[in-house]
Amino acid sequence: MDAIYADYSISMSEFKKNPAQVLRTAGEKPVAVLNHNRPAFYMITPKLFEALVEALADKDLADLARERIKGIDGAIEVDIDSL
């Protein structure tokens, strides 16, 4: 059995009947669209998609910062006024 990462789910055939209504009913929550009782895809609003993209970008930035902190011993101190 596949995990479903959504509060709402709907069959593919029901989804095809009125996708806009499904989106309105779900509000800002993701919807799992099922094909033979398995997730075929997830439907999310643009607002939620933007939040996911921002969270991924923040994670990448945090990973980069952690990586740079590991190399702090090799850092060279500079005076910003002399640059």
Image (cartoon, grey):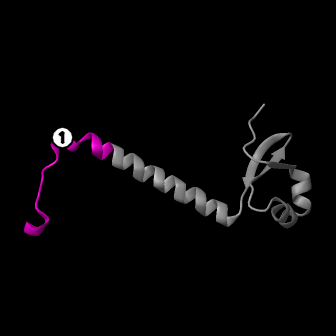
> In the figure, is residue 42 to the left or right of 37?
left
Q: Which residue is mark 1?
A: 73
Range shown magenta:
67-83
| Residue 2 place in picture, x, y as percent | 75, 34
**Quadrant occupied by the C terminus:** bottom left
What's the residue at 81%, 63% (across, down)?
Answer: 23
User: Is 66 one of the magenta-colored residues?
Assistant: no
What's the residue at 23%, 42% (across, down)?
Answer: 71
What's the residue at 66%, 60% (across, down)?
Answer: 48
What's the residue at 60%, 63% (across, down)?
Answer: 50
Instruction: State the residue in front, 27 or 2.
Output: 27
Q: Label 1's element?
A: helix
User: Is 77 one of the magenta-colored residues?
Assistant: yes
Instruction: State the residue in front, 36 or 30.
Output: 30
> In the figure, is residue 7 to the left or right of 70?
right
Classify 32 as above or below 51: above
Location of residue 22 (image quadrant): bottom right
> In the figure, is residue 56 to the left or right of 23?
left
**Quadrant occupied by the N terminus:** top right
Classify 3 as above or below 6: above
Q: Residues within 10 Å of mark 1 (few under 14, many from 20)?
A: few
Number of numbered discs: 1
| Residue 68 place in picture, x, y as percent | 29, 46
| Residue 80 place in picture, x, y as percent | 14, 65
**What residue occupies the far left of the structure in this picture?**
82
Name the residue type under label 1. Asp
